[in-house]
Every structure is written in C-alpha cells, then in structure tokens.
Amino acid sequence: MTAPFKTTIDQGVAEIVIERPPVNALDDAGWHALADEITRVGRDADARVIVLRAEGRGFCAGVDIKELDRHPEKIVSVNAGNYRSFEAVHRNPLPVIVAVHGFVLGGGIGLAGAADIVVAAEDASFGVPEVDRGAMGGGAHLQRLFPLQKVRMMYFTGEPIGAAEAYRLGAVEKVVPRAELREAALAIARKIAAKSGAMIQLAKESLNGVEDGNLENKYRWEQGFTLQAYMNKDSAETRRAFVEKRDASFDEQPGARK
C-alpha cells in the first residue's frame, strides 16, 4: 500500500504532506499510517518542528465514507486511527504547525484542532458534517479552535465557516493567499527550529499540562457516541445517501423521540 503522505526534513523542519486524491479523505489504513508517521517524526533527532499540510483540492475531508459504507464494521478501527492521529499531533514532543487550505472537514478538524499553530489559506473553510454522515466526533478539537456556541452552531447545522471568520475568532495565526501558504507555515517553523530544541519541547509539554481538561479523554467520550450512532438506522441511511449523491430520507417526523 502506498502511504497517503510524503515526509521530508530540512534544517530541523519536518514537512508531512497529505496526498490522497481526490479529497484527502483517509481510509482506515491511511489514518493509522499517518499516526505512525507523525509519531516517528516526533522522535527523529533531525526534526525540531513539524509542518503538516496537504496537496490537492483541500486539506482533509476526514474519513473515507465510501469505505465505511462498504465495511461499517471498520468503524472501531477508523475511530482508533483518528484518535491516534490527533493524539500524535497534540502529544507530539515537537510543536506541530498545520497549514490548511480548501475544505477542513471531520478528521481534518481533528488534526487542526490538535495542532499548536494553524495557518490558513484564504480559501480555507472549517466544518463538521458529522451529523449528516451518521457519526459523531470532532467537537473536542473544534472547541480548541472556536468558542462553545460557535461550535454548537457548526455541529448542529453542518455549516462551515471561512478563513476570515476563523481568524477573527482567533483559531488561526494568519490567513494568506493560497500560493503563499506553504512558505508562511515554513517561516514560522524556521523561527521555532532556530531555538533550543530542549527548551521548546519543555515548553510544549508544559503548555499541554496547563490546558483545561484532557483533550484525548474528551475525544474518547465523543467516540462512544459515534459507535452508538452507527447502531441507528439513520446512520446507515446518511452514508448511503452520501455515496449515492442524494438527500437522506428519514422515517420519523420532526420532534419524534425514540
């Protein structure tokens, strides 16, 4: 299997680039491979900071819904791959800068929300369409980016917000033209790489320790609801509708309770 990313290290800056056309939605194996790679790079003596970005139409569309439609039994492993990837970013001993463009959805939100610094292209948009895909997850990481009520609006409606609004809300460090995104992220990375590696690693561990709550525990709580969602017939209908490019059809009337 060809890895859905490529990695280079130059003068202390490790660059991991996601490449899985057409929308950088990773399958089960891809999420686990990404988690392994981020962890490996974090232990590489030549690396002092990590830049995570992508090529193609957008940063990351999350999980491969078509794979889950064919193999819903893989949800447990996909959940684990998501968890491991986000944890590999958040708990990495090195600072992780995520550079996003185009769509940042689902698992893309997890990667960005777990990061230390986010840089966005002008065309970037952040969204969590989980409810419309019959799943849960992403709220914990979304709350590292946006205020609580904004998170709920995005989660309940599935409506994304653009880079300018994300910047206004303090989620991203800067917004730049798409052509300048890579260099903007690398410029920040070089500033960090020039400092004492030992001090930067201590700083990251210290900052993680003073965060409000445990990000991984919060996300694990959400994943329990993803499994519960997958036991509901509406979940299968949302995935089938997505694959067939049609609107989902639900039997119950608005306001009905199970």
Image (cartoon, rainbow, N blue to C red):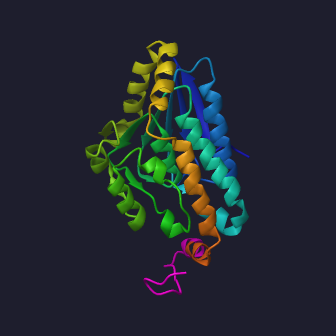
Q: Residue furthest left?
A: 168
- Above/below status of 137 relative to 241: above
Q: Residue at x 55, y 69 (%)?
A: 134
Q: Is residue 126 above or below residue 65?
A: above
**Does residue 252 show up magenta in the picture?**
yes
Closer to us: 21 or 233: 233
The answer to which image quadrant residue 242 occupies is bottom right
**Image coords of residue 256 (percent x, y):** 47, 84
10 or 192: nearer the eye? 192
> Which image quadrant is residue 47 in?
top right
Magenta range is 239-258
Main SS, magenta region, reads loop
| Whole-percent x, y for residue 63 in the image | 58, 56
For image coordinates 73% across by 64% down, the residue present is: 73
Q: Picture coordinates of residue 148 (x, y %)? A: 36, 53
Q: Residue furthest top?
A: 196
Q: Nearer the viewer, residue 217 or 249?
A: 217
Q: Note whether residue 57 is visible.
A: no
Q: The C terminus lies in which quarter of the figure? A: bottom right
The answer to whether residue 111 is left or right of residue 81 is left
Seen at 41% across and 32% down, the residue is 185
Q: Position of residue 193 (x, y in %)?
A: 46, 18
> Can you see residue 220?
yes
